[in-house]
Amino acid sequence: MTSVIWEEFCDNEKREQKIANNAKNKAAREANRIRHTTGRCSYSNKKYKLDESGIKIVPPSTTDKWLLGHEGSDGSVHPSAVEKHQLNNEMKNKEQVVATHRY
């Protein structure tokens, strides 16, 4: 990182609007009761990385991406998301059963 980039970064971090946005975002993160496990990676990027690596092909549904975003790399579910994860899995299974009996 060059000194120019570092100076721009520091100047940006000191701006009133940046400080206000950081405080607002911190409050929003703290209000979120269910934690995801994607880190800085979005659901779509995590899906893309898994699809590209061949580890797992993830269907593009919102439910599948939500489930994926709350599972760790070892398959464990974040403790704050266990109940909702089970409900989403049940919904997903019901949708699959209904879809197979439509025709």
Image (cartoon, helix red, strand yellow):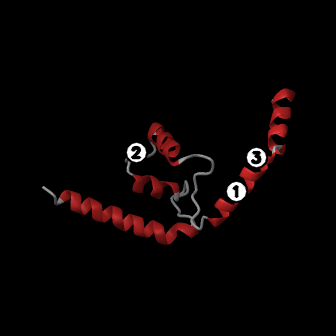
Image quadrant occupied by the C terminus: bottom left
Q: Which residue appears at 37% of the width and 47% of the height?
A: 59
Mark 1 neighbour class, 10 Å CA radius: few under 14, some 14 to 19, many 20 or more: few
- Which quadrant of the figure has residue 96? bottom left
Which quarter of the picture shows residue 64? Answer: bottom left
**Cβ atoms under marks 2 and 1 closer than 8 Å:** no
Q: Is residue 50 above or below residue 94?
A: above
Type of amino acid under label 3 = Gln
Task: State the residue position of label 3.
Answer: 17
Can you tell which of label 2 and label 1 is closer to the viewer? Answer: 1
Q: Disc 2 designates what residue?
A: 57
Residue 5: percent from left, percent from top: 81, 30
* Residue located beneath label 1 in the image: 24
**Among the two numbered marks 3 and 2 on one chain, the one whose residue lies closer to the N terminus:** 3
> With respect to residue 3, does 75 lie above or below?
below
What's under tag 2, amino acid-wise? Ile
State the residue in front, 76 or 95: 95
Image position, residue 93 (x, y; %): 31, 63
Q: Is residue 29 above or below residue 83?
A: above
What SS does tag 3 mark? helix
Tell me the quadrant of the picture where the N terminus can be found.
top right
- The type of residue carrying mark 1 is Lys
Identity of the residue drawn at 20% across and 57% down: 100
